[in-house]
Amino acid sequence: MNVLLVFAHPEARSLNGSLRDVAVQELGARGHAVRMTDLYAEGWKPVVDHDDFPAQDRSKRLKIAAASGETFAASALTVDVKAEQDKLLWTDVLILQFPLWWFTMPAILKGWIDRVYSHGFAYGVGEHSDRRWGDRYGEGTLAGKRAMLVVTAGGWEEHYGPRGINGPIEDLLFPIQHGVLFYPGFDVLPPFVVYRADRLDDVGFSAVAEQLRDRIRSLATTSPIPFRRQNGGDYLIPTMQLRADLGAPGKDGFALHRREDDEPISEKPYL
Ligand code: FAD
């Protein structure tokens, strides 16, 4: 398989750096082709601005989505963004690796998404009408590929449990896993999360490294999170509401958008 690892930590000798090396080594040992985007080391430009749309008239008001779509359609994206899109098209598996900072990804990684996810590439794909709301949430440019988060967190696992004060980890990661990864088509694997990362000693590191190797070995076979596909019949079009007859009693919020284990997959769009 082809694997792209996007790495967002400023220090190569960090825990994250060591875990990245473990992952890359295991991927290589399994015969996978690996490409890396090391955002800090490469000096990734983390903000969207006029410079991202060189062919646009700077005297006019910048409308980001329109400028993004026009620039993408004209193949006039900046070289760095184009290179990342090519890597995404090349890869079978995307790994985003980062320390949890203020309950989400570091800003530099958000900036990678903001810039690389052009209109026409990651959003604004497919037919948009009152009968079909585009190719997204399970369909789109990156459909058929897999993605996984590798995250380190200072907090305890219990702090991120169902009743933990930080909120459940699956809720905190929902905007990334569902909004950023599932949206353009990725099948999203359960995240690999290291808790109490700041307290990790050598013994702890060895155990975590082995768990990560295990997840790398099963990248092709691990079942994805069962997010509901937008165009699979579970949602009303065009309101995009989950059908009233779906979702277990008592479930609400983000959990509604994951299928239950025993729930049949809708075959036909419900119009
Ligand atoms: P490092 O500091 O590099 O290392 C952590 C520990 O691993 C060290 O003790 C190190 O000795 C040890 N270690 C053991 N073996 C090795 C090895 N082989 N290689 C390297 N290190 C090893 N946490 C939360 O839970 N929620 C938050 O919202 C949150 N927000 C944060 C915001 C900011 C701005 C910052 C700076 C931290 C935040 N944290 C938060 C904590 C953060 O998630 C952790 O500090 C981070 O995940 C640790 O990863 P690291 O790679 O930076 O670790």
Image (spheres, rainbow, N blue to C red):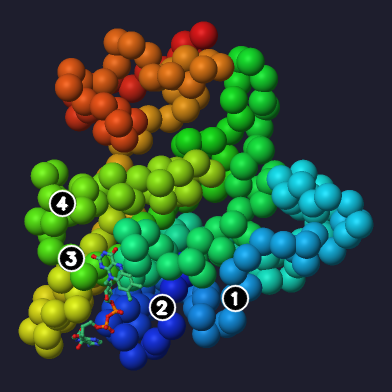
Mark 3 residue element: loop
Evaluate whether residue 69 shows in this view: no
Task: Residue type at mark 3: give it.
Answer: Gly
Mark 1 residue element: loop
The residue positioned farthest toward the bottom in the image shown:
13
Cα distance, mark 1 to mark 3? 28 Å
- Residue on which disc 1 sits: 44
Q: Is residue 200 above or below residue 259?
A: below
Task: Residue type at mark 2: give it.
Answer: His
User: Measuring 28% from the left and 45% from the top, which residue is drawn there?
Assistant: 171
Asked if the residues shown at circle 3 and circle 4 are in contact, with their CB atoms under 8 angstroms apart, the answer is: no
Cα distance, mark 2 to mark 4? 26 Å
Is 130 positioned to the left or the right of 5 in the image? right
Q: State which mark lies toward you, 3 or 2.
A: 3
Is 125 positioned to the left or the right of 213 in the image? right
Q: Of label 2 and label 1, which has the lower sequence position?
A: 2
Cα distance, mark 3 to mark 2? 18 Å
User: Measuring 13% from the left and 64% from the top, which residue is drawn there?
Assistant: 156
Q: State which mark lies toward you, 3 or 4.
A: 4
Cα distance, mark 2 to mark 1? 12 Å
- Residue on which disc 4 sits: 165
Crowding at mark 4 (Cα within 10 Å: few <14, some 14-19, many 20+): few
Q: Of label 4 and label 1, which has the lower sequence position?
A: 1
Q: Of label 2 and label 4, which has the lower sequence position?
A: 2
Q: Of label 3 and label 2, which has the lower sequence position?
A: 2
